[in-house]
Image: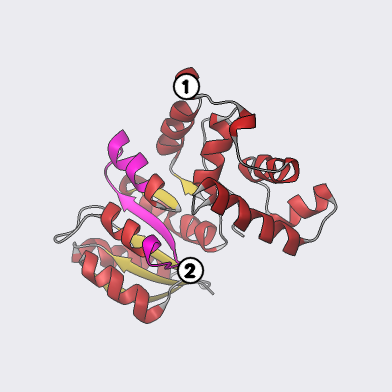
């Protein structure tokens, strides 16, 4: 049962999110906060599986919180919940290490599914955000040669499958290797590419022409 910390400076929004998540019998909300400082403190205290984080907070913004958590090695999946869909905010958060990005207009219908997905280690993007991500990643001017990646041929294979949304078990099955080998390889790929999530790794795969993706949703399991 994934544990969740919710940080949003609007009490009514927090109450709504708690109500939605608490109706799911497989999710447990362990704490709530209203500021970036609360987010850092509550993650350290509760070590949740998922942090649901608003962008606009009264002390620091969600991008800064995400960067600080990743810089300190904090491991929760970070699910951004916001009204903002401008490119600067979207890509700032994804590049900082956010695991998922859900628009508040979609929240009531998709919050439970998004929390379950990121708790499993998958990435989750609202469709409008996914369209922006794919559009940017596939711009011709942003394409780079695949041989520029510092990866072995086997790691390239795993990166391609990862970017296509394959879970670790499916990658292992396709390549006839163990799931543990896949997990270790994904961690090595992250380190070599300087990323912290499958969304970031998938963007690099797309940018280097390794995979083709459709401009919808999400997905993939973490190491």
- Left or right: residue 25 versus residue 36 is right
Q: Position of residue 176 (x, y in %)?
A: 85, 52
Of residues 183 and 127, the one nearer the viewer is 183
Q: Position of residue 165 (x, y in %)?
A: 63, 45
How packed mark 2 is, by other alpha carbons closer than 10 Å (few <14, some 14-19, many 20 or more), is few
Query: Does residue 5 lie above or below 56 as drawn?
Result: below
Q: Which residues are magenta?
A: 70-93
Question: Does the rendering let one see residue 211?
Answer: no
Query: Does residue 210 lie above or below 38 as drawn?
Result: above
Kind of element beneath mark 2? loop
Query: Does residue 41 lie above or below 208 as drawn?
Result: below
Q: Quadrant of residue 172?
A: bottom right
Of residues 158 and 11, the one nearer the viewer is 158
Q: Considering only order in the chain, which callout, 2 or 1, is on the residue closer to the N terminus?
A: 2
Residue at horizontal 29%, vertical 70%?
40
Kind of element beneath mark 1? loop
For the residues labelled 1 and 2, say whether their Cβ atoms are less than 8 Å apart. Answer: no
Q: Position of residue 32 (x, y in %)?
A: 29, 73
How packed mark 1 is, by other alpha carbons closer than 10 Å (few <14, some 14-19, many 20 or more), is few
Of residues 24 and 192, the one nearer the viewer is 192
Q: Position of residue 85 (x, y in %)?
A: 31, 38
Magenta segment includes 79: yes
- Left or right: residue 35 versus residue 184 is left
Measured Cα–Cα span from mark 1 to mark 2? 40 Å
Check disc 2 and report the residue beneath it: 24
In the picture, which quadrant includes the N terminus?
A: bottom right
Check disc 1 and report the residue beneath it: 139
Q: Residue furthest left?
A: 58
Q: Quadrant of residue 120?
A: bottom right
């Amino acid at each position: 049962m994934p544990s969740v910390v919710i940080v949003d400076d609007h009490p009514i929004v927090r109450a709504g999110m708690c109500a939605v998540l608490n109706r799911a019998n497989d999710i447990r909300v362990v704490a709530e906060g209203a500021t970036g400082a609360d987010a850092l403190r509550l993650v350290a205290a509760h070590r949740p599986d998922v942090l649901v984080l608003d962008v606009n907070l009264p002390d620091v913004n969600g991008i800064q919180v995400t960067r600080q958590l990743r810089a300190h090695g904090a491991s929760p999946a970070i699910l951004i919940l916001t009204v903002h869909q401008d490119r600067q905010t979207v890509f700032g958060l994804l590049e900082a290490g956010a695991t998922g990005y859900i628009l508040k207009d979609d929240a009531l219908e998709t919050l439970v599914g998004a929390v379950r997905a990121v708790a499993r280690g998958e990435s989750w993007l609202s469709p409008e955000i996914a369209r922006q991500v794919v559009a940017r990643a596939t711009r011709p001017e942003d394409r780079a040669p695949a041989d520029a990646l510092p990866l072995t041929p086997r790691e390239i294979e795993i990166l391609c499958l990862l970017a296509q949304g394959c879970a670790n078990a499916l990658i292992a099955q396709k390549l006839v290797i163990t799931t543990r080998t896949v997990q270790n390889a994904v961690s090595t790929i992250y380190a070599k590419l300087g990323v912290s999530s499958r969304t970031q790794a998938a963007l690099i795969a797309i940018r280097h022409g390794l995979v083709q993706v459709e401009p919808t949703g999400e997905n993939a399991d973490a190491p």
